[in-house]
Amino acid sequence: MLDIFDSTCVLLAKAEQKHYLFTKKLLNEKSLGITPGQMMLLYTLYKGDGIAITELGKKIFLDNSTLTGLIDRLEKLELVYRAATPEDRRCYNIFLTDKARALETNICKTMAHVEETMTGGCSPAEIAAFRKVLERIFATL
């Protein structure tokens, strides 16, 4: 192991960097035309679309300005659309298009493949412990 990996911070950052690049490569190979960040947003909307940008931001832990850029790019790809809410015309709900729904199986399979690859060789107990540590890091920071 490299000397620099004696720091958990560096190891976590570099592991996430590899995770991102691996995911990006798979998305490109499958010609899905989306980024890992866009995949995360679509995955969240697959669990329930038609929600306000602010609520979506809370679900994926992104601020509205970052989220707006992601949504803008997904709109250009015709994967999502905004619809004004009747009670507040300044507020928009985000919906998936039929084109995005057609990608759902492929996107979810890609995510599962990434997870299987990155945890390959790990026991279910190790994966559960890893998830618990990641959740604790997330809650602490």
Image: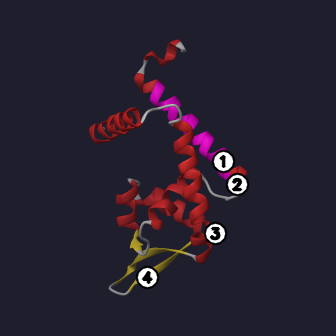
Inspect the magenta stretch and tell me whether residue 14 lies in it: yes
Quadrant of the frame with the N terminus: top right
What is the magenta range? Answer: 11-27
Q: Residues within 10 Å of mark 4 (few under 14, many from 20)?
A: few
Disc 3 to disc 1, C-alpha distance: 21 Å
Q: Are marks 1 and 2 in contact (CB under 8 Å)?
A: yes
Disc 4 to disc 3, C-alpha distance: 18 Å
Give the mark toward the camera: 4 or 1.
Answer: 1
* Label 1: element kind: helix
Q: Position of residue 41 (x, y in %)?
A: 49, 60
Image quadrant of residue 17?
top right
Q: Position of residue 3 (x, y in %)?
A: 51, 12
Q: Are marks 3 and 2 in contact (CB under 8 Å)?
A: no
Residue 51, compared with residue 89, is above or below; it is above
Q: Is residue 130 left or right of residue 24?
A: left
User: Upstream in the sequence, badge 3 or badge 1?
Assistant: 1
Q: Residues within 10 Å of mark 2 (few under 14, many from 20)?
A: few
The residue tagged 2 is 30
Inspect the magenta stretch and tell me whether residue 16 lies in it: yes
Give the mark toward the camera: 4 or 2.
Answer: 2
The residue tagged 4 is 84
Amino acid type assigned to the residue bearing label 4 in the image: Ala
User: Upstream in the sequence, badge 4 or badge 1?
Assistant: 1
Q: Is residue 91 left or right of residue 105?
A: left
Disc assigned to residue 26:
1
- Most extreme residue toward the top is 3
The residue tagged 3 is 76
Q: Position of residue 89 (x, y in %)?
A: 39, 83
Disc 4 to disc 2, C-alpha distance: 33 Å
Give the dominant element type of the magenta stretch: helix, strand or loop. helix
Q: Is residue 14 visible?
A: yes
